[in-house]
Amino acid sequence: MKIKSKQLKNIFLGTFLLLSIVTIAQPNTTYAASKNNASQVGVVNYQLLIQQHPDAVKAQETMNAAVVQAKSDLDSKSVNMNDQEKQAYYQQLQQGLAIKEKELLGSLQNKVDAAVAAIAKAKGLGTIVDKGSVVYGGQDITDDVMKKITGK
């Protein structure tokens, strides 16, 4: 089995995109800001906050560089490998990329979570949920969180 470099890059990028979507689609966005105000609910567009966080571009660049490095490693180190060894090495590289992506997204999510919690506490909101989960009601604090994140 011969893996072409363009196919490899597409597989890495596809995997990154898929993991990003899954991670963003299932955010942990419930925060207890105050037990006394537990009935007040705020909402945020969590995906937007992640995408527009100032560190998101840097995280994407870092991930892209890791993909390029992994591809380069595969190309250079797999020259004398048989197909089974190439596949095993490819899987090892994919696992490393998945770990890297998890670290980058985790860091980004922690920063967004901290900003959400700070705004929720300042507004006396007891619970914050993702906007996509809300049918009706709740105080949208997305803009306030974005201002805290970006400093604008």
Image (cartoon, rainbow, N blue to C red):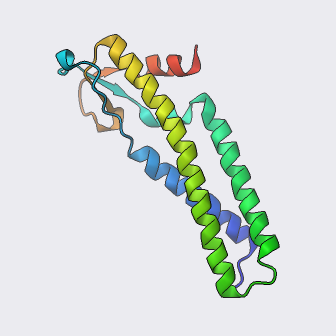
For the residue pair 26 and 62, the one nearer the viewer reads as: 62
**Image check: 101 left or right of 33?**
right
Task: Look at the picture and state if 59 lies above or below 3.
Answer: above
**Image check: 98 left or right of 35?**
right
Residue appearing at x 48%, y 50% in the figure: 21
Task: Look at the picture and state if 25 lies above or below 84.
Answer: above
Q: How far across and how far down the image is residue 128, in percent?
A: 31, 27
Q: How far across and how far down the image is residue 46, in percent?
A: 43, 34
Total marks placed: 0
Quarter in which the C terminus is drawn: top right
Residue appearing at x 60%, y 36% in the figure: 56
The quarter of the displayed image where residue 37 is located: top left
Q: How far across and how far down the image is residue 126, in percent?
A: 25, 21
Q: Is residue 14 visible?
A: no
Residue appearing at x 43%, y 30% in the figure: 113
Task: Look at the picture and state if 103 lies above or below 48.
Answer: below
